[in-house]
Image: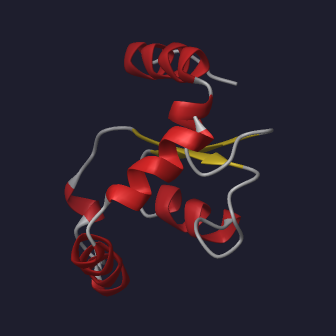
Amino acid sequence: WFDWLVDDAMDMQLHAYVDNAVALMNSDLTGLTDLYDGPVLVIRGELDLPHLITDDIARLTADSYRNGRLLTWEGAGHSPQLEDPERFNITLEQFLKGAAMD
């Protein structure tokens, strides 16, 4: 997946990357997360780069929802759904069914 991700990123136009980064830096969902009562699953790869999605950021995101839950996957990086799609599909199915997940 790494080669594909790099190739895809290299094809991205600069303004798309910059505009996305600026939007993420300026987004603030304070007060909006309380409007959603449903379950929320945040999946973070333990090997994510320290300056992208830290454990603190992932925990804060999950905790900002009433029914938020954080899963940290060992051995996964920034894109666990691409790095282990079979595990992701199983986890998503369990989540949607309300079952316990590892």
The percent coordinates of residue 35 (x first, y second) are 19, 58
Task: Specify whether 30 is left or right of 49.
Answer: left
User: Could you tell me which residue is drawn at 75 percent across and 50 percent down?
Assistant: 46
The percent coordinates of residue 75 (x first, y second) are 80, 38
Residue 65 shows in the view? no
Is residue 16 positioned above or below 66 on the image?
below
User: Could you tell me which residue is drawn at 48 percent across and 17 percent down?
Assistant: 89
User: Could you tell me which residue is drawn at 29 percent across and 80 percent down?
Assistant: 28
Is residue 22 positioned above or below 101 on the image?
below
If the image is split into quadrants, where does the C terminus sit? top right
Q: Quadrant of residue 43?
A: top right
Residue 43 shows in the view? yes
If the image is split into quadrants, where does the N terminus sit? top right
Relative depth, front residue between 22 and 37: 22
The percent coordinates of residue 37 (x first, y second) are 27, 46
Is residue 38 positioned above or below 85 on the image?
below
Is residue 86 positioned above or below 62 on the image?
above
In this view, which residue lies farthest toward the right? 75
Relative depth, front residue between 90 and 49: 49
Task: Specify whether 40 is left or right of 48.
Answer: left
